[in-house]
Image (cartoon, rainbow, N blue to C red):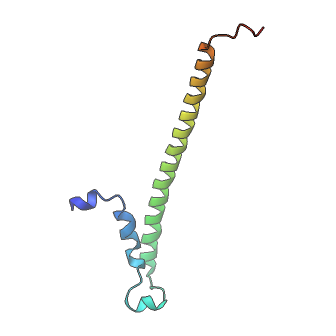
Amino acid sequence: MAEDLNDPFKLFRDMWKPLEMTGAASSGVPPMFSVEDLEKKINELKVIEGWLTVNVNMLQMSIKTMEMQKAALQTLQQAAAPADPNKR
């Protein structure tokens, strides 16, 4: 049980277990699903899609924040740099 909590990929492995090719299905015949199984799988995939979307948005926000910090730091460094006396 504790191992399940420490495994971030358990959800993904459990999600694909019904699709594993075993027995007669290993001959290339796709496994048969009921409508309820397909609805459940669709809902699980939508939850994962939402989770991934949130993570992509957070990553994009982090990148933009770091780019703004970089630009601000470069501006401060340029302002603090001694002026070149030869330029007029």
Residue 26: percent from left, percent from top: 43, 88
Indicate left or right for 87 with 62 as reference: right
Q: Is residue 85 above or below residue 61?
A: above
Asked whether 79 or 4 is in front, the reply is 79
Asked whether 37 or 72 is in front, the reply is 72
Residue 8: percent from left, percent from top: 35, 58
Q: Residue at x 45, y 54 (%)?
A: 51
Asked whether 79 or 44 is in front, the reply is 79
Screen quadrant of the N terminus: bottom left
Indicate left or right for 27 with 69 as reference: left
Q: Is residue 85 above or below residue 38?
A: above
Asked whether 19 or 82 is in front, the reply is 82
Residue 65: percent from left, percent from top: 54, 34
Q: Residue at x 38, y 86 (%)?
A: 22
Q: Residue at x 21, y 59 (%)?
A: 2
Q: Farthest residue in the front direction?
A: 86
Indicate left or right for 74 with 54 as reference: right
Q: Is residue 83 above or below residue 25?
A: above
Screen quadrant of the C terminus: top right
Q: Is residue 38 above or below residue 62?
A: below
Q: Farthest residue in the right direction?
A: 88
Quarter-of-image position of residue 60: top right
Q: Residue at x 40, y 79 (%)?
A: 20
